[in-house]
Image: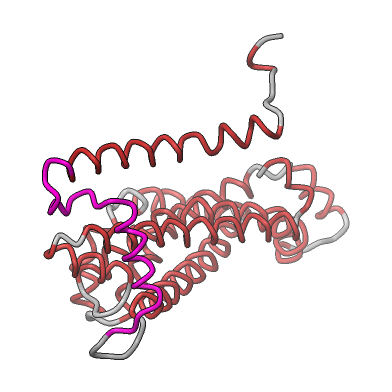
Amino acid sequence: MRLINRKPGPVLATFLALLPFALVLVAYVIASDIRLAANPADKLLPAPSTIFETAQRLFTEPDKRSGRILLWHDTAMSLQRLGLGVAIAATIGLGAGLLIGLFPHMRAGLAGFIAVVSMVPPLALLPILFIVFGLGELSKVVLIVIGITPFLIRDLSQRVIEIPREQIVKAETLGASSAVIALRVALPQVLPRLIQAVRLSLGPAWLFLIAAEAIASDLGLGYRIFLVRRYLAMDVILTYVIWITFLAFVIDWALRKLSVRLFPWMEEGL
């Protein structure tokens, strides 16, 4: 049997999934041991035990000045910004995707514009956003929206365009209006793709959030990472990076489960 046709069993699949993580951990432990053996005061690669102790302190001990556990407050603020930005982008992307995908005049007028806008590096617009919207919450949310909305529009509009023409013709034959076709024919088929597109855009959304928080914020996961970098507090930075990665994984997992639950016929394609 050719390798391309062989599938791993459950045990082997689990082993192969965990293997890269184990290799990275082993490589880090070896590198950390080498650096600490040469210089016990080295801060670049702290020992895993040090990272664990730091994480335990960050998750449980309140700040002496504010009395708050800063990591939880940073997490709440970052998730609030991320959730709001992604929700606005998804709403705009869904509406614009339906319009561009269904209506040729909208496609002729907006498709090229969206394609050009999607090429603009969102981080290059960050200074402009701070000037226009200030240094508060609005500019951070707007950066996320600007960063991922063009991708969502292009992805969803393409999905609408790929809807078989026969379905639209049948709906028209039954007397359906353009609005009914959009809501009853196109929308149900686009919603599963919307969740997938949001999952794909979460990585860039986190990037834009961390960048905005690092430059102008007094609370948030990105702000805390860039605050402690001047002290070379790698144990704190790595704890926050691992925590952000965990949050991103949980959000992605939750969206996947939501998609499977709402659209079970898409399960094999996820």
Q: Residue furthest bottom?
A: 66
Q: Is residue 210 above or below residue 151?
A: below
Tell me the quadrant of the picture where the C terminus can be found: top right
Q: Position of residue 243 (x, y in %)?
A: 41, 62
Q: Is residue 69 left or right of residue 267?
A: left
- State how many labels appear: 0
Residue displayed at 54% across by 52% down: 197
Q: Note whether residue 35 is visible.
A: yes
Task: Write the start and end of the magenta stretch as one range.
Answer: 37-63
Tell me if residue 48 is in the magenta stretch.
Answer: yes
Residue displayed at 70% across by 61% down: 182
Q: Position of residue 253 (x, y in %)?
A: 59, 56
The one nearer the camera, 20 or 188, is: 20
Q: Is residue 49 left or right of residue 104?
A: left
Residue displayed at 46% across by 54% down: 201
The one nearer the camera, 42 or 23, is: 42
Tell me if residue 150 is in the magenta stretch.
Answer: no
Q: Position of residue 149 (x, y in %)?
A: 44, 60
Q: Residue furthest right?
A: 174
Q: Is residue 139 left or right of residue 264?
A: left
Q: Position of residue 61 (x, y in %)?
A: 35, 80
Q: Is residue 139 above or below residue 202?
A: below
Q: Is residue 24 above or below residue 169?
A: above
Q: Note whether residue 109 is visible.
A: no
